[in-house]
Amino acid sequence: MQRQFGGVLLGSMELFCLAAELGSFTAAAQAAGITPAAVSRSVARLEARLGVRLFTRTTRRVSLTEAGSDYFQQCRQALAQLGEAERLVSGRQSEPAGLLRISLPTTYGHYRVLPLLPAFRARYPQVRVEVELSNRNVDFTSEAFDLAIRARAQADSSLIARPLEDAPLVVVANPDYLRQAGTPQSPADLDGHQCIQFRLPSSGRPVPWLFREQGREVERYTQGDYCCAQDILACATLARSGAGLAQLMRFIVEDDLRAGRLQQVLQDHGGCSRPFSLIYPSGRHLPLRVRVFIDFLLQAVGR
């Protein structure tokens, strides 16, 4: 096989990634123990080889160009795989290490995963964690994510979806609202109430509420003058403020129920949940840092 990359080029790629992460040639030089001029020369070699500008330079900092951002994502993934290969064959794979990149739904991330990360890093201090909080479906190949958690798994044969947990749903309202509007005794009573809507970004339609009726799960579309999109925490805020009823995952409102700021209704028709899954590419060797994180999450929150 013909050689394409020499040691100097790989070193330049490492310095490029370091400068991109830190946003400064000087900071990258300090981290690498070399001079800023050496970092600048390494980046210049890469730009000459590729025929594109990777950074926009100012007197205070550097920032990636569009081409530089694309190259950074690919280089970071390639260098991580090289490091993983070295650990695998050298026997150092017994100690999880490296950068773990995960994508989390906004609400689930805040309430269920982010609070666990300090405990994870205390157990595996050589693992660095980078988190993106968003509700979009990420591209594992081009964006170099190791793992994602989603409420609705993608229908993609190239991905593995492992069930993580079923998050129970509850219908809640401010006690003052219930005193004024009355407490619904059955799902049919919701027709006379303000039901706070959450619009699903993918379809633009309000999410149906789920209930148990006669031993089976039933979807019911509700009505109301408030509708939220993107961030379901807005529904919780409106419910606390007395705007109406909302169906939310219990972990969002656990503290509110305990403190009496919200009151649960329709318990006899509860028992429904939203499933969350761990998603990662199939057919790819899972680095140890990913495997231990999966095991950690399944133990901490998994069903």
Image (spheres, grey):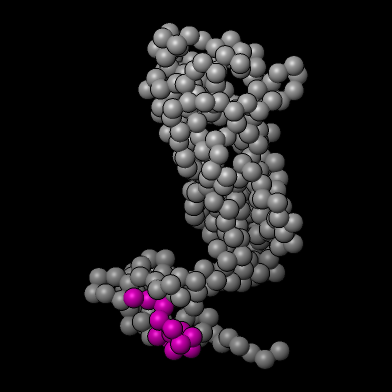
Residue 202 visible: yes
Q: Is 143 located above or below residue 260 in the figure?
A: below
> Looking at the image, can residue 125 be seen?
no
65 in relation to 236, above or below = below
Magenta stretch in the rendered image: 44-56
Specify the farthest residue to the left: 59
In the shown orientation, is residue 145 left or right of residue 232?
right
Identify whether 53 is placed above or below 187.
below
The quadrant of the rendering that contains the C terminus is top right
Residue visible at 47% across and 42% down? 230
- Residue 237 percent location from the top left of the image: 40, 28
Which residue appears at 49% of the width and 15% of the height?
A: 263
Q: Is residue 287 magenta?
A: no
Residue placed most toward the observer, 193 or 147: 193
User: Which of 19 and 242 lies nearest the eye of the viewer?
Assistant: 242
Q: Position of residue 44 (x, y in %)?
A: 40, 85
The x, y position of residue 83, in whole percent, is 60, 69
In the figure, residue 139 lies in which quadrant?
bottom right
The answer to which of 235 and 75 lies nearer the viewer is: 235
Residue at 66% of width from left, 40% of height from top? 164
Instruction: Where is residue 278? Give x, y as percent.
Output: 65, 46
